[in-house]
Image (cartoon, coloured by chain):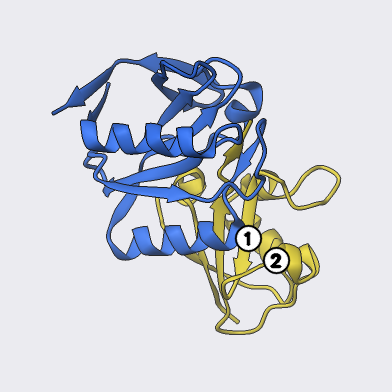
Chain colours: A yellow, B blue
Amino acid sequence: MAIEVKIPTILRTYTGGAKSVDAKGDTLSALIDDLDGNHPGLKGRLVTEEGALHRFVNIYVNDEDVRFTGSLDTSLSDGDAVTILPAVAGG
Amino acid sequence: MLSIDRAIRDAIVDHARRDHPDEACGVVAGPEGSDRAERFIPMLNAARSPTFYEFDSADLLKLYKEMAANDEEPVVVYHSHTATEAYPSRTDISYASEPNAHYVLVSTREPDSVEFRSFRIVDGVVTEEPVEVVE
């Protein structure tokens, strides 16, 4: 099961410059573990030590922000598209 | 150095004035790798706050898809401070995640004058840069 994951500029240091990579997993959490296996360090930029999605990033599955679809428990199927974007915010 | 057309600089300042006392925010996109700030894109501050700004997550996705389709990147990411100086706050630094972008800060704290400054923010390090306004 291959899912295309779009990688933002700031995280392309982990993917050898690739703008998108393929990964596997039936939940977002499993997908991130798979990504981290091939691109070590990536998980730490997406998930906090407490195991929650980092507030500095937005992750979308087929254009839906996963914060509204179950966060890391969001289920995935073959052909889904995952997009990672840094939040644009500040004080 | 940030080189920016006067019309775009003025549009950023106008946006900041219009949304005062809330913070205004947006992007100026340009061809990938060109460092040319060409397409002014004001964004909605989803936080509608005088002390915080945030692009709405659906707007953010739409913006990045549009830029990807046009082979563009965010050359400038701007926002305003409405009661403090035009210098990145600790929160600004912790969120900054476009290593190629010029982070523009506008302060609208004075009604008659405006501060317009540009910074690089890379790995938590802030470096101010000169701004060249092109007529």
Neighbour class for label 1 at 10 Å: few (<14), some, many (≥20)? many
When the figure is inspected, residue A24 is found, relative to residue B65, above or below; the finding is: below
Q: Which residue ends up furthest to the left in the rendered image?
A: B135
Image point (57%, 76%), residue name: A62
The image quadrant of residue A34 is bottom right
Q: Is residue B14 or residue B75 the one in the foreground? A: B14
The image quadrant of residue B101 is top left
Image point (70%, 66%), residue name: A66
Which residue matches tag 1? A59
When the figure is inspected, residue A42 is found, relative to residue B50, above or below; the finding is: below
Residue A45 percent location from the top left of the image: 65, 44
Quadrant occupied by the C terminus of chain A? top right
Mark yes or no: residue B130 visible. yes
When the figure is inspected, residue A55 is found, relative to residue B124, above or below; the finding is: below
- Same subunit, labels 2 and 1: the answer reads yes
Neighbour class for label 2 at 10 Å: few (<14), some, many (≥20)? many
In primary-sequence order, the first of circles 2 and 1 is 1
Quadrant occupied by the N terminus of chain A? bottom right
When the figure is inspected, residue A48 is found, relative to residue A23, above or below; the finding is: above
Look at label 2 and name its amino acid: Val
Residue A79 percent location from the top left of the image: 55, 83
Q: Which residue ends up furthest to the right in the rendered image?
A: A50
Label 1 near label 2: C-beta < 8 Å?
yes
Image point (42%, 48%), residue name: B42
Disc 2 is placed on an element classified as helix
Which residue matches tag 2? A66
